[in-house]
Image (cartoon, rainbow, N blue to C red):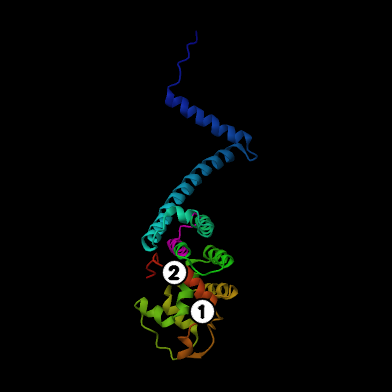
Amino acid sequence: MSDQVPDLPEERSKKRTAVEVASEGALGAIPFIGSLLAASLSAYFSATQENRTREWMEEMADVVQVLIDRVDDLEAANLAGNPVFYDAAVAAARIATATSSEEKHRALQNALFNIGIGDSLDADKRVIFLRYVDELTPSHIRFMRFLDNPTGWFEAHGLAWPSVYMGGLMSVVEVAFPEWRTDEPFIDTIANDLVARGLIDNPGLRTVMTGNGLTAQRTKPKGREFMGFITGPFDADEG
């Protein structure tokens, strides 16, 4: 008869967990301690991913509820069975769970809402526009909204239009976005990214122009179409 005292259930559970983690470390190609850390990180990241997935499903449920409230005889099953909506929902979930940006989440909710009510976009264009939501930053989207209607942007944000009757648009941008004032290369990058995607005209940030030129709309039809795609009832206050 053995004199060894049996492990309590909690102790056995702890030992079993330690053995399982140690086994992962023994099988890993990196040093043992590093593998243990990797296993721990995997658990932590998995928990974060699960939380983000749950939060996004709640946000998508809000979209479905708004659609049901606004579209006659629409049910959740109809949306789930709609290949267009389902494809977009899967893509949106991948994007949403990879970012903590509230503005991107609102853009994705609006996109799904617009698809749910039956937008007129080509299927491939929807895919491209969802990719833009993934690739572009909230700064890109804010800058594009400003370029679409410069004076309207100032009014919406309670800002006085600067006393510039002739000059470059950069001086106006720095008033609209004071946090960018000391980082012109950042502004250039944002503008170049939007130009490269055909969403805006070259804004001519340092081109001398008249007052009318400074207030002119600089978004292209494609850019306005994209903004329409990500605009809807879930718009957040951009203040």
Q: Main secondary structure of the magenta part?
A: helix
Residue at 47% in and 72% down: 228
* Image quarter (top left, top right, bottom left or bottom right) of the C terminus: bottom left
Question: Which residue occupies the extreme left position in the image?
Answer: 158
User: In which quarter of the view is residue 66 placed?
Assistant: bottom left
Are discs 1 and 2 less than 8 Å apart at CB? no
Q: Name the residue under label 1.
A: 219
Q: Distance between the residues labelled 1 and 2?
A: 15 Å
User: In which quarter of the view is residue 159 placed?
Assistant: bottom left
Question: Which residue occupies the extreme top position in the image?
Answer: 1
Residue at 46% in and 28% down: 13
Secondary element at tag 2: loop
Secondary element at tag 1: loop
In the image: residue 147, left or right of residue 196:
left
On the image, the x and y values in percent for residue 225 come to: 51, 73
Residue 8 in the image: above or below residue 237: above
Which region shows up in magenta?
A: 97-111
Could you say which is closer to the camera, residue 159 or residue 178? 159
Q: Which of marks 1 and 2 is in front?
A: 2
Q: Mark 2 points at which residue?
A: 231
On the image, the x and y values in percent for residue 216 come to: 47, 85
Classed neighbour count for the residue bearing mark 2: other residues with Cα under 10 Å, few (<14), some (14–19), many (≥20): some
Q: Which of marks 1 and 2 is nearer the N terminus?
A: 1
